[in-house]
Image (tube, coloured by chain):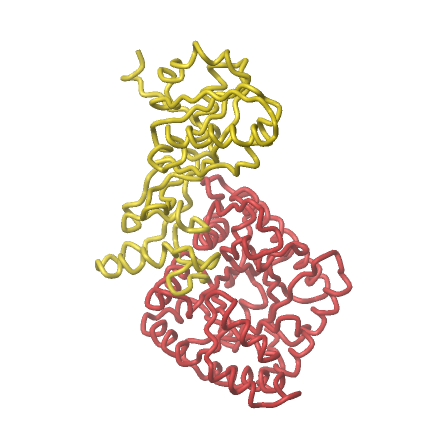
Amino acid sequence: MSEYKSGSNLEKVLKAGHFAFTGECGPPQGANVEHLVEKAGHLKGYVDAVNVTDNQTAVVRMSSWAASLILLEQGLEPNFQMVCRDRNRLAIQSDILGVYSHGIRNMLCLSGDHQKFGNHPDAKNVFDIDSMQLIHTVKTMRDEGTFLNGQKIDVPPKLFIGAASNPFAEPFDFRVYRLAKKIAAGADFIQTQCIYNMDRFREFMKRAVDMGLHEKCYILAGVTPMKSVGMARYMAKQVPGMDVPDTLIKRLRSAGKGKIAAEGIQFAVEQIEEFKEMEGIAGVHLMAIEWEHRVPEIAEMAGVLPRPKV
Amino acid sequence: MIVAEPKPIKEILEMVRDLKKILIVGCKGCVTVCNVGGSKEVAILASTLRIAAKKNGKEIEIGEETLERQCDPEYIEEIKDIINDYDAVISIACGVGPQFLSERYPATRVFPGVNTRFMGGAIEHGIWSERCAGCGTCVVHYFGGLCPIARCSKSLLNGPCGGSNNGKCEISGDVDCIWDIIVRKMMEQGRLDELLEFKPPKSWMTARDGGPRTMTREELVK
């Protein structure tokens, strides 16, 4: 038996006690492989794994497993994302077998944004199972070696199981319990929603640490650098479950013309510095949305380079 | 009750454009309660069709009937002597009505006059809200007496998702996040432990996913 659950690079980095640093790359709205390779190329060597989103915001894109395989070919480690919106339990389990067979070792389990947000609002959704049950499914397949129906799997998939947590969504008091529930269901690591309200996040983490959750699971803090005041306002008003304090919007605005993006990066770097010291935080998940080329400098500024080789 | 709403009159006029003798059939069940398919609405639709025909210089004959229920063959039978006098029937019962009529009177064209929306109730006069998805295995007692299958946009059994926003669902500020209500209620009642229990994947076999449903209660079958 391997000492690892999946043997992924991310798992090894975390298990060795390093501060993990993961990135993100959204597949193209088309078959533009060249563009995907170019975007992902910026992350190579700067992150431990790259999240590959699954039709995020319910907009049709290249499938997350296919884009994950392209990243794998490029020498990057994907963190394959899967949502429950578009697949029933048959498709979910067969895709899990498929990605594992091709060398994918990390998987992030999500419910998925409702299709009403996306570019096919007339679609029928699936939601046969929810994100909690998806975590449980991957764990059952890996650790019990069975499908959901109890039938034995001929070579079970060994994936490092990720889940999301939104510390800012209502009802706030329940969020840490839901995190505990995801860990109990089988999550090995957590990537949080983008954090902007540091006070609230500190309170959330204090509760998580009091419950000992950080000892059962690796918690990676979500960071998305603000590119502009417009983006900050959009995140504050339009994105469900996002908490952007006015003080941050003011700070960005007062940076002045031409310096707002740099200020956004500066804030992200300060956050990462604090997360490195925060009890219970095992790493950072940097979601630089369509800003992959800025990841190397953010990583450099935040002092998370070079990435460990385990 | 089964909640329905009137079809746009334009759509109904288009459906029966070439027909001269039409029987409008209402129902005294759910659709009467939700003010869409009772005798009053039969009369309103009949006058509307007559006025429209007159305006277009067409001759039209409209019959009006309201049955006790359209989901029961016994009452469907009541129009057997008059139905052949008409070119077509507009049923303003829920989706069951036009089908029971079509099955009993295969030679007659039947049109739906309402859109059947959901199983729910009136939360105030003129406002109806969905409560049941008819999944066939009721579990509301696990969720503070509230149904996340019918009322959560993602039918989550282990909610709430990260899109819950000040008590509202991520899909719209007009939609309550049922999980927000469930969590608050259970926490107030000191039943947090129950919410922390993992709810396994549900069997949808008893829901529509298991195929069209028929139910037999042997003790009632003659």
Can you say which quadrant of the picture contains the C terminus of chain A?
bottom right
Display colour for chain B: yellow
Image coordinates for residue A292, horizontal then vertical, percent? 67, 73
Image coordinates for residue A70, horizontal then vertical, percent? 71, 60
**Which residue is outermost to the left?**
B189
Q: Nearer the viewer, residue B55 or A216?
A: B55
Q: Please tell me in which quadrant of the rendered image residue A26 appears.
A: bottom right
Q: Nearer the viewer, residue A74 or B76?
A: B76
Residue B103, above or below A126 = above
Q: Residue at x 64, y 66 (%)?
A: A25
Q: Residue at x 46, y 15 (%)?
A: B104
Residue A80, above or below A195 = above
Image coordinates for residue A272, horizontal then vertical, percent? 52, 82
**Numbered-mark total:** 0
**Which chain appears red?**
A
Left or right: where A272 falls relative to B167? right
Q: Nearer the viewer, residue A116 or A142?
A: A116
Q: Please tell me in which quadrant of the rendered image residue A253 appears.
A: bottom right
Q: Residue at x 68, y 62 (%)?
A: A72
